[in-house]
Image: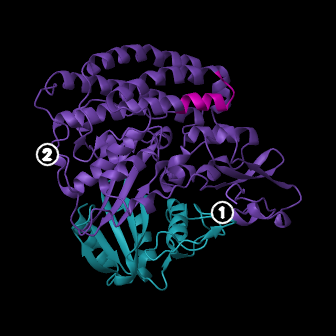
C-alpha cells in the first residue's frame, strides 16, 4: 500500500479544481482560449494564464494563481514572531533581505524599540538589503531579456549576481534564504574584511551597469520588442495599487524609502529614477526595465555611503553586539499595525493583529507587491498581440513565491 | 491632513457612519458601519482634500468564536498628500457580508477574492468573486479560527 501512487489521473481533475473562466460553449466563433502555463518557462515559476484570443490579438488574460501557495498566513498564526522570519524569506526568495527588513521593522514598531536600534545595525540592514535589491534587479533584467530571446544577458547577470550571493553568504551563511535580520538586531555582525571586499565589489559592478545598458536596454532588437508595448497609464497604475519600478516606470516619483523615510534612508543620498518615455510611450515595458537598471546605480550609491558609515562613525568595535537588543520574549501589546517598505518589486506590507496575550500574531497578512502588480496584467495586455504577452508579463517582474505566499 | 481632521470630515458628511475610533492602531483607525462603507469609501476617494487614491492593503480577520465577529481592514493612503488611514468594518461571524469596493479601487478585486477564499467573507457587488489561491473544489475557509481541513483532496491525504 505504501508504494501506491496517491494521485490518480481523472479527466475532471483540471476542470473541477481550476476551471477556465471562459466556457467553450459561450465563446464566439472567432474566439479561442489558449492556456499558458503552469509549466511555461516564461511564467517564472508556476502560474497559469488563460488567454482569450481573436486571431493574433489578445482579448483578455485571466491569471490562475495558487500553484505555489504555502499557507504563509496560516503558518504565521501558530509561530512565535522570531520563527516567522524564515517563512518571510521564502515569500520573495530573490530579495529575502528586503522582506526580512520590512518584517523586523513591523515587529519592532509594535514593541516600540525602533528608536533604540543601534545605528550600526541599521546601516548593515540597509547595506544587505540594497545588495539584495541589486541581485533581484539583475535577475529581473536577465530573465526578461531571456524571455524575449536574448540569451547572453541572463548568463552575464547571473555571473554578477553570484558575487553578491557570495557576499551575503559570507555574512549570513546562506545564499538565498538568510534569516539574517532579526527582530531587534542581526544574527551576526559583518565578518571581518566584509567592508573592504564590498568596496571592491562596487568598483567591479559600476562598469557592469554600463555594460548592461549597452547590452540590453539600448539594444535595437530589445527596444523594438519592448517600446510602446504594454503601456501602463499612471492613473490606471495607481488605481490598481501598482508600486515599485512599475509605478515609477509610468512616470511617478514615488519611492517609500523617500516617502516614509524608514530606517536610515533619510540620512542617505540617492535619487528616484522614473520612466520618461525615451523610446516610446511613458510606462511601456522598456521604461520599466530602464528604471530597474537606473535603480541598480542608485543602490550602488547607497551601498557606498553605508560602507563609509560602517568604516567611519559606526565602525566595528569589540563591545558591539548585534543581538544585544533582541528580545528574549516577543509579546507586543494588543494592537493593529500596518507596516510597509520598498522592496525591489514594490510596496511590501504586513498587517499584524496582536491580542497581547500570546507570542504569536493573531493575524499576519502579507500585502505582496507581486500579487498586486500581477493583477494589472489583463488591462495592459488587452488588444496586444500574443507574441507580446511574454514581453508584458516579464516586464512586471513577479516572483511566484510572493504572489501565492 | 491629520487623523482628527479626516475623522471630522467623514463624521460631518456621514453622521453615524463612524462607530468607534482606534487610536492605538498604526495608522490610526476608524470603525465604519458596514452599510455606509461604499459611500464613505467613494467620498474618501473623490474628495479633493482627502484624495485617498491608493488602497494599499485589504485584510480579512476572523476574531474567533468568542468575539463572534469578523473584520475587514482597509489600509488607505494618499499619494499627493502623503496621509494614511485604516478603516475597519466589523461583521457578524454567522453571515459576513460586506459591500465590495472593487469599483472604486481596482486593487480590491484580488484582495477581496483572497479574503473570500481564505475567510469566506462575501463581498456584495464584486465583479468576479471566485477563489483565488485555493482550488475551486476545496472545502472550507482555512483562515477561520474553527477551520477543520478535509481528510482527502482528490485522493491525496491532506494531513501529512
Circle 2 residues within 10 Å: few <14, some 14–19, many ≥20: few
* Residue at the disc numbered 2: A116
- Please state the chain letter of the residue tagged with numbered disc 2 in the rendered image: A
Range of magenta residues: A140-151
Q: Position of residue A38 (x, y in %)?
A: 68, 48
Q: Nearer the viewer, mark 1 or mark 2?
A: 1
Q: Position of residue A350 (x, y in %)?
A: 37, 55
Q: Quadrant of the N terminus of chain A?
A: bottom right
A232 or A334, nearer to the observer: A334
Would you say B27 lies left or right of B160 here?
left
* Residue at the disc numbered 1: B156
Secondary structure of the residue carrying tag 1 is strand
Q: Colour of chain B?
A: cyan
Colour theme = by chain
Q: Colour of chain A?
A: purple
Q: Which of the 4 image quadrants contains residue A45? A: top right
- Please state the chain letter of the residue tagged with numbered disc 1 in the rendered image: B
Amino acid at each position: 500500500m505504501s508504494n501506491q501512487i496517491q494521485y490518480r489521473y481523472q479527466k475532471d481533475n483540471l476542470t473541477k479544481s481550476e476551471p477556465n473562466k471562459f466556457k467553450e460553449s459561450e465563446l464566439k466563433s472567432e474566439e479561442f482560449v489558449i492556456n499558458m502555463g503552469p509549466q511555461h518557462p516564461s511564467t517564472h515559476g508556476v502560474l497559469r494564464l488563460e488567454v482569450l484570443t481573436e486571431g493574433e490579438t489578445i482579448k483578455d488574460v485571466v491569471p490562475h494563481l495558487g500553484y505555489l501557495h504555502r499557507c504563509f498566513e496560516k503558518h504565521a498564526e501558530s509561530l512565535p514572531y522570531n520563527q516567522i522570519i524564515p517563512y518571510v524569506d521564502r515569500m520573495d526568495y530573490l530579495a529575502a533581505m528586503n522582506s526580512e527588513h520590512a518584517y523586523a521593522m513591523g515587529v519592532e514598531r509594535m514593541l516600540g524599540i525602533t528608536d533604540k536600534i543601534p545605528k550600526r545595525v541599521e546601516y548593515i540592514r540597509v547595506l544587505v538589503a540594497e545588495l539584495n535589491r541589486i541581485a533581484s534587479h539583475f535577475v529581473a533584467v536577465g530573465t526578461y531579456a531571456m524571455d524575449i530571446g536574448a540569451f547572453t544577458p541572463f548568463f552575464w547577470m547571473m555571473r554578477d549576481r553570484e558575487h553578491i550571493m557570495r557576499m551575503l553568504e559570507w555574512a549570513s551563511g546562506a545564499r538565498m534564504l538568510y534569516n539574517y535580520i532579526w527582530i531587534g538586531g542581526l544574527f551576526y555582525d559583518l565578518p571581518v574584511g566584509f567592508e573592504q571586499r564590498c568596496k571592491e565589489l562596487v568598483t567591479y559592478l559600476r562598469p557592469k551597469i554600463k555594460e548592461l545598458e549597452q547590452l540590453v536596454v539600448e539594444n535595437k532588437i530589445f527596444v523594438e520588442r519592448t517600446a510602446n508595448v504594454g503601456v501602463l497609464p499612471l492613473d490606471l497604475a495607481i488605481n490598481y495599487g501598482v508600486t515599485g519600478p512599475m509605478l515609477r516606470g509610468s512616470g511617478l516619483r514615488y519611492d517609500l524609502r523617500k516617502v516614509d523615510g524608514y530606517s536610515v534612508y533619510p540620512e542617505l543620498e540617492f535619487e528616484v529614477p522614473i520612466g520618461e518615455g525615451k523610446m516610446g510611450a511613458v510606462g511601456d515595458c522598456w521604461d520599466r526595465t530602464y528604471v530597474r537598471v537606473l535603480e541598480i546605480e542608485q543602490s550602488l550609491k547607497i551601498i557606498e555611503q553605508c560602507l563609509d558609515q560602517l568604516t567611519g562613525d559606526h565602525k566595528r568595535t569589540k563591545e558591539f553586539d548585534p543581538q544585544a537588543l533582541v528580545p528574549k520574549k516577543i509579546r507586543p501589546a494588543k494592537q493593529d499595525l500596518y507596516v510597509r517598505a520598498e522592496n525591489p518589486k514594490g510596496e511590501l506590507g504586513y498587517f499584524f493583529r496582536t491580542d497581547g496575550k500570546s507570542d504569536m500574531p493573531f493575524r499576519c497578512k502579507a500585502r505582496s507587491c507581486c500579487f498586486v502588480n500581477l493583477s494589472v496584467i489583463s488591462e495592459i495586455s488587452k488588444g496586444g498581440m500574443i507574441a507580446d504577452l511574454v514581453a508584458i508579463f516579464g516586464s512586471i517582474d513577479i516572483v511566484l513565491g510572493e504572489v501565492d505566499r | 491632513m491629520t487623523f482628527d481632521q479626516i475623522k471630522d470630515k467623514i463624521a460631518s458628511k456621514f453622521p453615524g457612519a463612524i462607530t468607534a475610533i482606534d487610536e492605538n492602531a498604526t495608522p490610526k483607525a476608524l470603525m465604519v458601519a458596514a452599510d455606509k462603507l461604499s459611500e464613505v469609501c467613494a467620498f474618501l476617494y473623490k474628495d479633493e482634500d482627502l484624495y485617498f487614491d491608493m488602497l494599499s492593503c485589504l485584510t480579512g480577520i476572523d476574531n474567533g468564536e468568542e468575539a463572534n465577529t469578523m473584520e475587514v481592514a482597509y489600509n488607505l493612503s494618499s499619494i499627493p498628500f502623503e496621509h494614511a488611514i485604516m478603516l475597519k468594518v466589523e461583521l457578524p461571524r454567522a453571515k459576513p457580508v460586506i459591500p465590495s469596493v472593487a469599483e472604486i479601487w481596482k486593487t480590491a478585486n484580488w484582495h477581496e477574492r483572497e479574503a473570500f477564499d481564505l475567510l469566506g467573507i462575501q463581498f456584495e457587488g464584486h465583479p468576479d468573486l471566485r477563489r483565488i489561491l485555493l482550488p475551486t473544489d476545496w472545502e472550507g475557509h482555512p483562515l477561520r479560527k474553527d477551520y477543520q481541513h478535509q481528510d482527502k483532496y482528490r485522493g491525496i491525504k491532506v494531513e501529512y
